[in-house]
Image: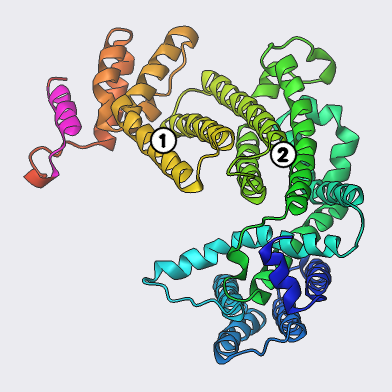
Amino acid sequence: MSEAQKSLISISPKAPVAIVVAAVLLGLAFDYLFFDKPVGISFPIMCLLVTVGLFAILQLAGRKPTWPEYWFLIPFLFFAAMVAVRASPALAFFNVLASYAFLTLLVRAASGQSFHPRSIFGYFIEILGTILYFGESTKAVSETIAQLRVGDSKKRSVQMLLAVIVALPFLAIFLVLFSSADLVFKSSISGLADAFGGKFWAQVFLVVVVALFSAGALTVATLQKGAKAAPATSEGQEKQDLTFVVTFLSLINALFLFFIVIQVRYLFAGSKGLQGFGFTYADYVHKGFFELVAVALLSFLLLYGAEALVVRTGGKHAAAFKWSAGLHIALVVVIILSAFRRLSLYEQAYGFTELRLYVHAFVIWLAVVFGLLMLKVAMNTEARRFSFQVLMSALLGFALLNLLNPDAFVARKNLARLETTGKIDIGYLAALSPDALPVIVSGLGAKDQAMLTEYLSKYRNNHPLTKTSAPWQSFNFAASKAEAVMSVK
């Protein structure tokens, strides 16, 4: 058992169970008050329920609220009430944000941990850090399971069952995203996809998410100062955490593998076999990019959280976790390749744009980040070093984009597409920055003088000459070169 969990029990043996029960009740209340309903008086009611639950857990733990906790409670409930008083959507949005911010500070004050940020950014970091409440919820859930007083083998079975329960809403999300991204996948699991896409599963997912978040927040509020920072050292607890994470990843990996089999058979192999599905290859490939990027981003968050949850024995991850995580990363990289191919085929059909180039660059960088995450898991890299590597990869990618000259690259690609398809969007080319002008003038001048004349006319409308009117402080090399080219045309 971890020191954090011992601290949780030392406060009150009933605290973990009470936190789980309160969290589930809050999840059900959230579903009843908000699901498929406009926000109104339901918001202050929910905030009152959260307040009652928080102070009930503190009372059970023998903790007496202090003045800072009461102080944060006043603006928390005030802004919550204003959501039901005012009808302005914009004002309601900011009232909800303000309520959430003060709830975060209320939980921090209840935990007994000092909070004195050196700058205004410290408050924003604290609020954004509430995403970690999902990880903190495992303390209360794990200790509740431990209090069942069952043998190690049964505890392992309970952890596996818990992993299945937690995985269900994520499987539902991935099913919906995959079904939206891939028509063959949707046809293959039409019945199951419809079931997971229904209101019932949406409500189940909502209840689970709110319950986990609430359990984490109540755990943070209940733990005494410094309790949650202690590392978990119990070998039995380490094995239970490992069982939970490996089971969770295995379920996600199975779904990903099924999706990838379809990708290899239909997307990467071409149009063979699509005749029986009632749509063309163009219909099949010209959608799904953003859904697959969403899958990759969600996978990163899940895997990063799982990697932080699993305790390292002797500073190293267990082999079972490395294999599960490695397989998951490999599957996600294939999904990223699928998204990349879909965007490439879309560009071949509709042309290249600056935005699509940046999206391409983002997808490539995302694959690099997953590669770094693979190294983090395999080499047991510290989180601080991993964060630095991700930052450096982003900076390197940005530098490469500057060297690539995006607008000139887009212009070259569209001119090459003109050679093969005879199609080009002169209006879009004229909207590109002066970076692209020399390439376009050279390319169109060698192919079609009428197109070049049309381009120059539209370019002049979009980019009037400024050499004589602009101050010297506004000098730009690319713009100066473009104006020099235009002056002789």
Amino acid at dot 2: Leu
Q: Secondary structure at mark 1?
A: helix
Magenta span includes 390: no
Residue 397: % across, % down: 38, 33
How far is disc 2 from disc 1 in space, using C-alphas? 28 Å
Task: Indicate left or right for 48 with 428 as reference.
Answer: right
Magenta span includes 478: yes
Query: Picture quarter containing residue 439?
Result: top left
Query: Picture quarter containing residue 52?
Result: bottom right
Magenta span covers which residues? 474-487
Image marks 2 and 1: residues in contact by CB distance under 8 Å = no
Residue 192: % across, % down: 88, 38
Numbered circle sitting on residue 219:
none
* Nearest to the observer: residue 375 or residue 39: 375
Closer mark to the observer between disc 2 and disc 1: 1
Near mark 2 (Cα within 10 A), the count class, few <14, some 14-19 or many ≥20, is many
Sequence-first tag of 2 and 1: 2
Tell me, yes or no, if residue 389 can be seen here. yes
Numbered circle sitting on residue 177:
2
Q: Residue at horizontal 41%, vertical 18%?
A: 413
Task: Indicate left or right for 272 with 102 as reference.
Answer: right
Q: Residue at horizontal 16%, vertical 22%?
A: 485
Q: Which residue is mark 1?
A: 393
Q: Residue at horizontal 59%, vertical 86%?
A: 69
**Eyeballing the image, is 72 above or below 156?**
below
**Eyeballing the image, is 159 above or below 127?**
above
The chief SS type of the magenta part is helix
Mark count: 2
* Nearest to the observer: residue 188 or residue 478: 188
Locate the C terminus by quadrant. top left
